[in-house]
Amino acid sequence: MEENKEEKEKPSEIPFISFGNDEFIGKNIKKGDYVICKNCDGLHEILAAETIKNGKYIESNKLLFYKCNNNLYLCSVKGKALPGIEFRSIK
């Protein structure tokens, strides 16, 4: 069987990113804090991802993100900030 040379593997549409443990900033980031957006310079509230446990959706603080112009941006993993992210607590 001859391979079709015109068909090439398409690159993944899902971007991947990796960080080493020493690159995270050890802050206690939580849902409801605010991040200074690098796209619009505005403040956006930090949201929590959801996970399914026993058939129910529950919030998970493992991945925290913010939303700007209908795009989601990861900002914290397990309460530690990604490099270059600035946060504000507003009460």
Image: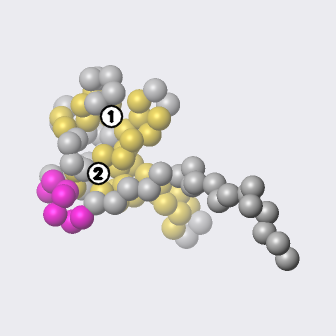
Quadrant of the rendered image containing residue 78: bottom left
Of the residues shown, which amino acid type is indicated by label 1? Glu
Q: Which residues are magenta?
A: 20-26
Residue 9 numbered mark, or none: none
Residue 81 in the image: above or below residue 33: below
Q: Do residues under tags 2 and 1 come within 8 Å of each other at their CB atoms?
A: no
Residue 45 numbered mark, or none: 1
Q: Quadrant of the N terminus?
A: bottom right
Q: Is residue 84 magenta?
A: no
Q: Tell me residue 19's x, y (percent).
A: 28, 60
Residue 60 in the image: above or below residue 30: below
Residue 26 or residue 31, whichever sits in front: 26
Compute the Cα span from label 2 to label 1.
13 Å
Residue 36 or residue 79, whichever sits in front: 36
Taking the spot 49% from the left edge, 60% from the top edge, the residue there is 51
Of the residues shown, which amino acid type is indicated by label 2? Ser
Q: Which is nearer the N-term, disc 2 or disc 1?
A: 1
Q: How many C-alpha atoms fall within 10 Å of the one at disc 2: few (<14), some, or many (≥20)?
A: many
Q: Is residue 91 left or right of residue 9?
A: left
Q: Which residue is mark 2?
A: 76
